[in-house]
Image (spheres, rainbow, N blue to C red):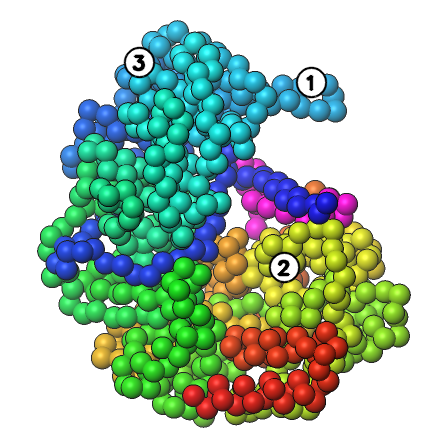
């Protein structure tokens, strides 16, 4: 039986007695506007009181938003929002305040009943003996100054909901459990969900496995409705307004379940609001009615944020200009840049079009063809995010605007990294620019790295050392995905494939790949990277390629070579992957606005935002980059950075506790990657041709000549389009 172990270890830096568990999202959706062509939702930041350090709970009562929050004085207060968006501060019941301030327990949920009554979900840590620790989950019922504790049976409890004086909780994979105020278990609902709510006689749930919103009868537990939601994401939450309208809120925006309970309507668009910003994690949204929502967010750079969405029937009349931005796939960084630009320019409408996702029913190849047709007909989007696209092809056809007047001053003033930008200057002209980058690094044994020149040297070593493995067992198609971008010799200057180099490349892949069946499940790119590092750490493989996109990858990679004991790292022949490549359509009518958006993407405010926990790559802004090369004094109250460790094979776990890089090690790493200067060329369509047409070769069904000819024929047709 295959093992499928995913162990997540989280250590937080927050100076609070609460634990935050958040999930990043990759899902995306097409930009769907409201059915009302004139109206739309205005977004307003609500200034939180300065004394608030951490918001424990938000609820709506007596026509007001209420916050329970910890203050700078390390005390808890209630803050009641007024009509002018200011807050009145009130004392909480002493019994509630005492529990919230008890450092011996962690309050994970607070539910409001009335001014004197609250229900809390608490985790209490108890030492069973010197070698172990037990976690006991307790429901605390507060009525005035009376506190009743109800200890729950062993389980992983979360998501406290109170409805008609009954208590509901998720108990891990067992589903939802329902209790009375005496702690008696009334009913168990065997339904799979990660978030839910209870309204009147219904339980409304989101099922990530089925990708659907499911409604159950409260008394019978029978399923009443099942509404398909293909783009459902773990970060989504549910909200219900006073008219019992149901909403799903998350990175896609706010979507309303229509009365037929079979379809959804986009109410607030995630692409053009804070909901879609990758550094914002929505923790609660209160739907006051169909025209007003208030969202509580935790922002990885700014902390708590409260944002109001108010419907304005004249919303679309207020724009002085409108731009269209195209991205082949969802791009969080460019979305963040656009959002930062809109903060200062609310009178500019920016429509984001995502060409391909797993839910919109077209292939990547078709999305690219559709874009090419638009651009070459003199139309198309104003700004193009070129990741996954053939930028050289657009440049040759005159489809991109020279933006050297924007970029050259930034180079001359030293604001952006020259080594990243210079490769994109052609005869003094710049048509596209990366706004982040991913250095290509190699982590491996000293023996193999000292003679490393590329795949040729690795294939030669593998043939001379057949009893060992260069890589973690990787199938040919996966190894192509991993190495295609860093073997630019395959491509001629005009973007076509070099037949001789292609042959040599495929022969090397055949030597270095493996069809060995594994005893673990590899589901994601992260799984594959971690598995490779685990093999390196335990000396079962010699090397791991890492296109570094997150700071956590540095922690994992460094720990791996320390555990190996005879390994190091290097930059892979100076290669880096340009990320968030941005260009302007030569037919753009609002060129000045488009150029200002590019400036915003490159400025310090946008670049300093921490994307490194969500595969955002490394900054091209020199001031921000240099800040990582300085060892700052530690804040005693901020002990460690957020660490996420995912173990793929329980027998090869990487020990981060004693092998993490020091601050000096991190400075050295940044100094190393600052030397990269050779951009990889990414053409996912071309890569997929190679993968598909080479399958027969790797199975022994076709020879190398047949294989390369088939690839060249497809590639030439594609490049001619």
Residue at x-position 40% and y-position 12%: 181
Q: Which residue is denoted by mark 3 in the rendering?
A: 116
486 in the magenta segment: no
Please determine whether, in this image, residue 718 is positioned above or below residue 590. Answer: below
Element assignment for label 3: loop
Q: Quadrant of the C terminus?
A: bottom left
N-term-proximal mark, 2 vs 1: 1
Q: Nearer the viewer, mark 2 or mark 1?
A: 1
Residue under the image location 53 percent in, 29 percent down: 174
Q: In the figure, is residue 246 to the left or right of 708?
A: left
| Magenta stretch: includes residue 653 | yes
The label on residue 128 is 1
Determine the image quadrant of residue 36: bottom left
Tell me if residue 691 can be seen.
yes
Where's residue 245, x and y in %? 24, 38
Measured from the top left, where is residue 546 in percent x and y? 65, 64
Q: Which mark is residue 715?
A: none
Q: Residue at the top extreme?
A: 146
Distance of label 1 from label 3 (alpha carbons) = 35 Å
The residue at the point 19 percent across, 33 percent down is: 243
Residue numbers of the magenta segment: 630-654
């Amino acid at each position: 039986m295959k093992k499928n172990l995913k162990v997540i270890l989280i250590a937080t830096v927050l100076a609070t007695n609460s634990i935050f568990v958040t999930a990043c999202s990759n899902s995306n959706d097409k930009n769907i506007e409201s059915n009302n062509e004139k109206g739309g939702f205005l977004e307003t930041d609500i200034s939180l009181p300065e004394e608030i350090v951490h918001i424990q709970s938000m609820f709506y009562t007596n026509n007001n938003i209420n916050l329970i929050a910890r203050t700078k004085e390390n005390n808890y207060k209630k803050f009641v929002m007024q009509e002018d968006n200011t807050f009145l501060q009130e004392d909480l019941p002493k019994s509630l305040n005492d529990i919230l301030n008890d450092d011996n327990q962690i309050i994970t949920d607070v539910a409001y009943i009335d001014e004197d009554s609250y229900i809390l979900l608490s985790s209490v840590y108890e030492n069973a003996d010197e070698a172990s620790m037990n976690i006991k989950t307790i429901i605390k019922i507060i009525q005035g100054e009376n506190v009743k504790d109800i200890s729950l049976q062993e389980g992983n409890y979360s998501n406290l909901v109170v409805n008609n004086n009954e208590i509901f909780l998720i108990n891990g994979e067992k589903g939802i459990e329902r209790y009375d105020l005496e702690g008696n278990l009334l009913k168990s609902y065997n339904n799979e969900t990660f978030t839910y709510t209870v309204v009147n006689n219904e339980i409304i749930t989101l099922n990530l496995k089925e990708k659907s919103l499911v409604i159950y009868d409260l008394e019978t537990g029978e399923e009443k409705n099942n509404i398909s939601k293909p783009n459902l994401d773990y970060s989504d939450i549910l909200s219900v307004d006073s008219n019992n309208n149901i909403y799903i809120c998350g990175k896609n925006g706010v979507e309303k379940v229509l009365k037929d309970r079979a379809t959804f309507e986009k109410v607030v668009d995630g692409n053009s609001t804070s909901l879609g910003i990758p550094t914002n994690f929505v923790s609660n949204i209160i739907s006051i009615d169909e025209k007003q929502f208030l969202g509580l967010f935790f922002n990885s750079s700014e902390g708590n944020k409260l944002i109001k969405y108010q419907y304005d029937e004249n919303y679309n009349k207020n724009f002085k200009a409108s731009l269209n931005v195209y991205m082949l796939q969802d791009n969080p960084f460019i979305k963040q840049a656009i959002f930062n630009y809109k903060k200062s320019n609310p009178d500019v409408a920016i429509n984001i079009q995502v060409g391909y996702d797993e839910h919109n029913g077209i292939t990547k190849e078709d999305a690219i063809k559709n874009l090419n047709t638009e651009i070459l007909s003199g139309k198309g989007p104003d700004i193009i995010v070129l990741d996954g696209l053939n930028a050289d092809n657009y440049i040759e056809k005159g489809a991109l605007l020279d933006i050297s007047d924007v970029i050259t001053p930034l180079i001359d003033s030293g604001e952006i990294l020259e080594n990243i930008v210079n490769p994109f200057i052609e005869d003094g002209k710049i048509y596209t620019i990366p706004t982040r980058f991913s250095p290509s690094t190699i982590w491996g044994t000293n023996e193999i790295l000292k003679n490393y020149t590329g795949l040729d040297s690795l294939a030669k070593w593998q043939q001379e050392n057949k009893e060992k493995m260069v890589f973690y067992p990787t199938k040919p198609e996966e190894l192509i995905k991993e190495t295609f971008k860093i073997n630019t010799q395959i491509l001629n200057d005009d973007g076509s494939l070099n037949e001789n180099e292609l042959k040599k490349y495929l022969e090397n892949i055949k030597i270095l790949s493996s069809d060995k069946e594994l005893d673990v499940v590899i589901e994601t790119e992260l799984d594959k990277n971690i598995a490779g590092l685990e093999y390196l750490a335990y000396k079962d493989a010699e090397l791991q390629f890492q296109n570094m996109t997150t700071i956590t990858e540095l922690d994992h990679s460094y720990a791996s070579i320390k555990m190996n004991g005879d390994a190091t790292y290097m930059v892979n022949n100076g290669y880096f992957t340009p990320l968030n490549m941005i260009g302007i359509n030569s037919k753009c009518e609002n060129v000045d606005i488009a150029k200002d958006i590019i400036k915003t993407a490159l400025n310090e405010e946008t670049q300093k935002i921490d994307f490194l926990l969500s595969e955002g790559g490394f900054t091209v802004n020199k001031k921000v980059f240099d800040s990582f090369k300085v060892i700052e004094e530690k804040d005693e109250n901020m002990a460690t950075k957020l660490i996420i460790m995912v173990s793929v094979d329980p027998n090869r776990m990487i020990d981060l506790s004693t092998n993490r890089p020091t601050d000096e090690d991190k400075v050295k790493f940044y100094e190393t990657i600052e030397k990269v200067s050779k951009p990889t060329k990414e053409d996912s369509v071309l890569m997929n041709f190679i993968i598909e047409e080479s399958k027969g070769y790797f199975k022994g069904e076709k020879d190398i000549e047949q294989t390369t000819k088939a690839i060249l024929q497809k590639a030439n047709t594609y490049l001619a389009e």
